[in-house]
Each structure stands twice: as structure tokens, then as C-alpha cells.
Amino acid sequence: MTQKTELTFEQAMDKLLSASEKLSKKDVPLEKAIATYKEGIGYYDLCVKILNEAEQTIEQIGKNVEGKEIEND
């Protein structure tokens, strides 16, 4: 398995959705369901971390350009 810290937000979301789909099946053995749930929580935490970092970056950019004209590349 790819280390979670190396995943992009989109990849982590895909894996989270995949875990959710696996858990929605009625024939999942309890042990497998628990392992999948635990894995899904890890991907959820990674998504939240990435989103929080993106929010901080956007806030910092906003502070840096406050009062300045934004230049287009």
C-alpha cells in the first residue's frame, strides 16, 4: 500500500470512498469491516489534514496580498 502521506487529496478521497463502498456491502465479515473502517478513518484524517494545510496557505496568501494589487501571470 502507498504510504498515506504520499497521497494527494484526490487519491485519499478515492480511497476513502472505496472504503465506504466496501463497508456498505452486506456480506463483509466483521474483521474485514473493522479493518476497512480503520483504514477509512486514516484516509479521512489525511483529507482533513490536507484541507487544513490548503486553508492555511490560502489565508497566508490573502494576508500577503492584502492592500496589494494581485498580479496575473
Image (spheres, rainbow, N blue to C red):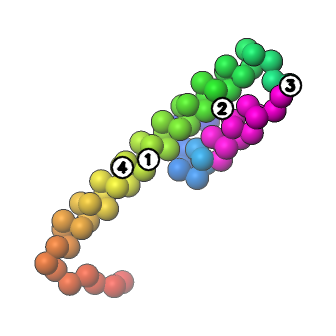
Dots 1, 4 in contact, CB < 8 A: yes
Main structural element of the magenta stretch: helix, strand or loop? helix
Q: Picture coordinates of residue 21 (x, y %)?
A: 74, 39
- Residue at 17 percent across and 73 percent down: it is 66
Q: Picture coordinates of residue 4 (x, y %)?
A: 54, 36
Label 3 sits on residue: 27
Q: Amino acid at mark 4?
A: Glu
Q: Can you tell which mark lies on residue 1?
A: 2
Real-space CA distance between mark 4 and mark 3, rounded to the nearest whole angstrom: 38 Å
Q: Amino acid at mark 2?
A: Met
- Residue at 37 percent across and 48 percent down: it is 52
In the image, taking residue 16 as reference, residue 6 lies left or right, namely: left
Question: Closer to the observer: label 4 or label 2?
Answer: 4
Q: Picture coordinates of residue 39 (x, y %)?
A: 61, 28
Real-space CA distance between mark 3 and mark 1, rounded to the nearest whole angstrom: 33 Å
Label 4 sits on residue: 53
- Disc 4 is placed on an element classified as helix
Dots 3, 2 in contact, CB < 8 A: no
Q: Amino acid at mark 3?
A: Asp
Q: Which residues are magenta?
A: 14-26
- Residue at 67 percent across and 19 percent down: it is 34
Real-space CA distance between mark 4 and mark 2, rounded to the nearest whole angstrom: 24 Å
Dots 4, 2 in contact, CB < 8 A: no
- Disc 1 is placed on an element classified as helix
